[in-house]
Image (spheres, rainbow, N blue to C red):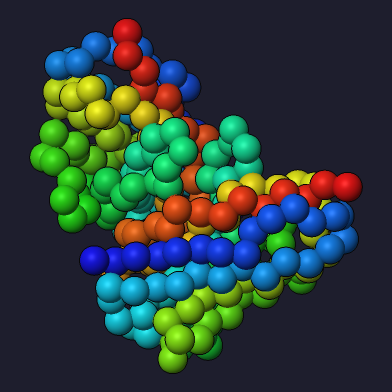
Amino acid sequence: QVQLVESGGGLVKPGGSLRLSCAASGFTFSDYYMSWIRQAPGKGLEWVSYISSSGSTIYYADSVKGRFTISRDNAKNSLYLQMNSLRAEDTAVYYCARDGQSGWYQDYWGQGTLVTVSS
Amino acid sequence: EIVLTQSPGTLSLSPGERATLSCRASQSVSSSYLAWYQQKPGQAPRLLIYGASSRATGIPDRFSGSGSGTDFTLTISRLEPEDFAVYYCQQYGSSPRATFGQGTRLEIK
């Protein structure tokens, strides 16, 4: 069965960096686009970034452009999100998700990892 | 950027009743690229509907989606106790941004 397991969240000071990882299993990882989506405490969902199956196409939300970098290692079935220059407003649960085969919706989600940016 | 507005904010119904949730877009959603998700407290969202009306794998047929252009609806024909949750719509036709609605909370009356 499809499994997505995030790790790497934690408490970081404003201006700091963090790298999130997502380990995928149960499907052919290299066949799928992947996304990161976040949810601030008590708030709604915000799409953050996605990456094509080969890694050649990448997009970011304006709110993280220039600060976050998405990447993947298809040999390791892993997705990453490097987060630099973190701000308090980046505090959220970050979900790794698989994009659907017929569009950029997300058909499977990980359990999420909490990132807290606070001094 | 396409803005999605969901209504009502909160819907109070009893098990067995029919639920109708609305999602309105600020501009036309191309090719009906609209999805619905369910989220329960402490859990990740779960895909219910994609392409405005296609049910995702394993989703019961009491869930149905309809609409096109700027107006979309999620209908739950007969509420089960496990259906009480927050529901989000998402448009994914406006590249490169996918946007979500603010959510509708479905609570037990």
Which residue: 16% across, 51% down? B58
Q: Nearer the viewer, residue A61 or B43?
A: B43
Figure check: B72 above or below A82: above
Outermost residue toward the top? B109
**Residue A24: percent from the left, percent from the top?**
40, 73
User: Quadrant of the rendered structure where residue A18 is?
Assistant: bottom right
| In this view, A84 is above or below A44 | below
Name the residue: 28% across, 73% down.
A26
Q: Residue at the far left: name it.
A: B61
Residue B100 location (% of width, % of height) = 49, 45
Could you tell me if residue B29 is visible in this image? Answer: yes
Using the image as rendered, state which of residue B16 and residue A62 is in the foreground.
Answer: B16
* Numbered disc total: 0
The answer to whether residue A90 is seen in the rendering is: no
Left or right, A78 with respect to B19, comes to right
Q: Is residue A19 above or below residue B3?
A: below
How far across and how far down the image is residue B59, in percent? 18, 46
Quarter of the image with the N terminus of chain A in it: bottom left
Where in the figure is residue B69, as x and y percent of width and height?
Answer: 35, 46
Q: Could you tell me which residue is drawn at 61 percent across and 51 percent down?
A: A114
**Quadrant position of residue A106:** bottom left
B56 on left or right of A48? left
Decide if residue A66 is on the left or right side of residue B17: right
